[in-house]
Every structure is written in C-alpha cells, then in structure tokens.
Amino acid sequence: MISRGFATLRNNLHTILYPVSLDMITLTVGALLMGISMQPTQTLQLTLNPGLSLLNDLLADDNQFLSFTIDRGIHGVQGSSVLMFLSLLIVVVVISAFFHAGVIGLLYEGVQGNSTAFSTLALYGKAHFLRFIGLYVFITILLLLGTFFLSIFFTLGFLGFLIISILFLVLRILFIFLEFTIVTDKINVLNALTKSLDYFRQRVPGTLEVIFAMLVFNTVIAFILNNWAHPFTFLLLLVPYAYIIFGLQFSLMHALHDIQTKEIDSQENARV
C-alpha cells in the first residue's frame, strides 16, 4: 500500500508544493505579525492529520508561527488584539477549510490517475470548504464539552494524561477516513462520522501499516522540530516532510479507494 502511495506521488510530484507553500506563508505571516520566538521543548505529539498535514502543526503551541491565543496579543497591541484575533481567525479558518478540502480532492483524483493541477484543488476546495468549516466547528464544540471530563482525568496526573492520550488516539484511528469521506462521498460531517467508521471496519490489508507509519513519522519529526526549535530546523525539514507525508497521504487514499471499490463490487454482485 505504501509503495503504491509513493508511486502515485512520483507521478504527481508537484503536489508537495501546496503544503510547502502554505507552511512558508504561515512562517512569513507569523514573523510579520508576531515575530518568531521558538524555545526548545521536549514534547511527545501523537499526530494524525489526514489530508492537509503541515509542518507548522507539529510545533508545540508556544512555537507555532501562527498561534491564535487572545492573551498573547499581536505585536503587543492589546486594545485591538481581540478584533485582530477574530479577523485573522476567520481568514485562517476559511483558507484552511478551502485547502484542506482541495488537497483531499487532489489525493482522490491522483489515486485514480486523473489531473492534480491547482484547478482541481480549487474545484474541490470551493465545493467542500463549507463542510470543513462545519467539521472545525463540530470538533471545537466537542472539545468544549469534553473540557470538564478532561479536567477529571488530568487530576490523576501522568496516568490520567496517558489514559486520555490513548483514548484520543484510538478515536482518531477509528475515524481516520472522516475528512476523506466528507470529500469523496460529498456528505456532511454527521453522515461522514458513521460512513467513515464503516469504511474503517471494512479496511483492506495495509491500511493499519499506513496509519502506523504516518503516526511514527509525525511523532519523530515533531520531536526533532521541537527539541531543536529554530526557523532553520523548520526550513531544513520542510521539503522532506512534505514529500514523505504526502506519499503516506496518497497511500491512505489508496486504502480508502480500494475499500470503496470493494463496496461497490459487493453491491453490484448483490443485485445479480
């Protein structure tokens, strides 16, 4: 499965320019608005981001180039920080939703041997960005509702942290196809929850290997990036990270496409 993903990537090598460009824009805008202040941080991040995986997302919160926290302010202008924060937040959410949907569309077309030009990204982004805004809102609500329960677990110290980390990781794996399903099946978040879980239950051989490889790779890169936190480290890892993670993203999309193909074949055989 992984070899198929990287074979597809080699045929669509230009696609890594999209996450690289977004990371560079994040670095530039963050430097202009808030400056760059990175501190070495030893952190363990178990990250799985199907679709739009950016290197900036692997940075610890305090090291991210665009970290949207009101109390941090922007250039220290406290009087307008809330308004500026909200304005930037809206812009970033819309752009993120557009590119998130668009990149998944590229992955979907790529595994089918179709065009992965920017026009394809724009087409999918325009068609599905509202659904991804809905996804972001849905996740935010869940996080807010879960704050109380999280506080209970964290009172248990390291054990509580371990339990909640494992819980989130298991849920992320179970719904690994959630973002992909929103785009490929053209459905809303709530319908995609049940459908993506059904896809995972029908997973084909090689699916778990792709998920494990993606998880380990992100964890290792996040450790390096935060332990040696510096813009030079970020720039050094930018292209290699985009290449490998995009190869794994294509691999994951191949897995979903195989599942969908198998499901369609089963339905057609049932009609005969």
Image (cartoon, rainbow, N blue to C red):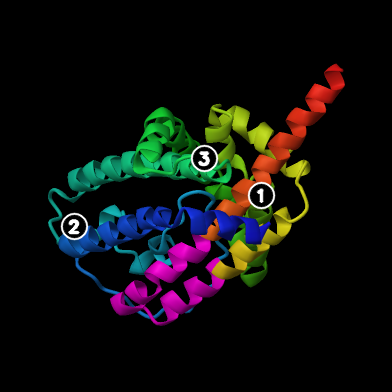
Task: Please tell me the numbered disc located at residue 198.
Answer: none
Q: Secondary structure at mark 3?
A: helix
In the rendered image, residue 139, in percent from the top left (x then y), is placed at 51, 41
Q: Which residue is mark 1?
A: 171
| Disc number lying in front (1 or 2) | 1
Is residue 234 rendered magenta in the image? Answer: yes
Which is nearer the eye, 61 or 231? 231
| Residue pictured at 44% horizontal, 45% vertical | 103
Residue type at tag 2: Ile
In the rendered image, residue 217, in percent from the top left (x then y), is placed at 57, 69
Which is nearer the eye, 104 or 224? 104
In the rendered image, residue 153, in percent from the top left (x then y), is placed at 63, 59
Residue type at tag 3: Glu
Which is nearer the eye, 39 or 157? 39
Q: Quadrant of residue 187?
A: top right
Is residue 174 rendered magenta in the image? Answer: no
Q: Which residue is mark 3?
A: 109
Segment tinted magenta in the rendering? 218-246
Q: Is residue 195 above or below residue 71?
A: above
Q: Residues within 10 Å of mark 2 (few under 14, many from 20)?
A: many
Q: Secondary structure at mark 1?
A: helix
* Quarter the C terminus occupies: top right
CB contact under 8 Å: marks 3 and 2: no
Q: Is residue 43 visible?
A: no
| Left or right: 66 as drawn, with respect to 112 | left
For marks 1 and 2, the one nearer the N-term is 2
Q: Please tell me whether the stretch drawn in magenta is mainly helix, strand or loop.
A: helix
Q: Secondary structure at mark 2?
A: loop
**Label 1, label 2: how many angstroms apart (C-alpha)?**
35 Å
| Residue pictured at 75% horizontal, 46% vertical | 203
For marks 3 and 2, the one nearer the N-term is 2
